[in-house]
Amino acid sequence: MSLEDTKSLAQKLSKQPPLGPVREVSPMDPDVSARRYYRVFYSAGETATAILAYMPDGEGPLGGGKEKIQQREAFVEIQQFFKSYDIPVPDIFSVSREERVLLLEDLGDRFLSGLIASPEVPLEEKRRFMMQTIDVLARIQSIPCTEEGAPLSLLQERRPQFEQL
């Protein structure tokens, strides 16, 4: 997909909700999968940027389990599941199953590991980030294990399959 095609697709998806005119689309560093990510810059509106995630057909690490499910569908299900338990996750602005893309909230490009390792970040700020991280992990751990078919079975079915990693 060319950058111009990506920009057109981003503009189409940006109408739900209205995010404004797309000014620029910039490819992000690829990960080790066939997924591709683009940062979308808007020239107006409340949202300055969003992430366009291209997820080609295929069952990735989260798509395993008994029920076959596409990567993007697994992403949406798990995002909704975590959000229902007030676990911080990026908002999903728009989904296009035909184009195999998601338009997501842009949470920035700072990583916890970089903040902790940085000599410029004050020790108190590092502690605050670590405590927030521990709090989120504890909240995830406290999600109740329930019987088959209940919300947690979604995650149990979507455990990473290490041979695919």
Image: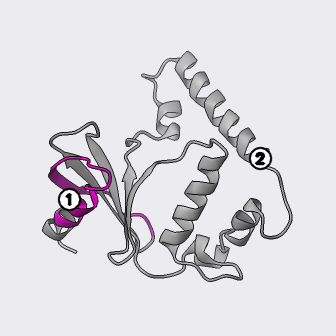
Q: Amino acid at mark 1?
A: Gln
Q: Which scheme is used to colour this image of the protein?
A: one colour
Q: Which residue is mark 2?
A: 141
Q: Amino acid at mark 2?
A: Gln
Residue 58 visible in the displayed image: yes
Q: Residue 153 appears at what percent x and percent y?
A: 76, 66
Task: Count numbered badges in the picture.
Answer: 2
Question: With respect to residue 146, does 105 lie above or below?
Answer: above
| Left or right: 27, with 61 as reference point | left
Q: Residue 63 appears at what percent x and percent y?
A: 59, 75
Residue 94 figure quarter: bottom left
Q: Which residue is mark 1?
A: 11
Q: Give the quarter of the figure containing the C terminus.
A: bottom right
| Left or right: 15, with 120 as reference point | left
Give 141 or 30, whichever is nearer the viewer.
Answer: 141
Which circle marks residue 150 in the picture? none
Q: Residue 74 appears at what percent x and percent y?
A: 56, 68
Which residue: 42% across, 64% down? 31
Is residue 92 found inside the magenta-colored segment of the image? no
**How dense is the environment of label 1, judged by Cα within 10 Å: few (below 14), some, or many (20 and up)?**
some
Q: What is the distance, in whole Å, between disc 1 and disc 2 at their CAs?
A: 38 Å
Which residue: 17% across, 65% down? 8
Residue 154 figure quarter: bottom right
Question: With respect to residue 148, does 110 lie above or below?
Answer: above
Question: Which residues are drawn in magenta?
Answer: 8-32
Q: Give the quarter of the figure containing the N terminus.
A: bottom left
Residue 165 visible in the displayed image: no
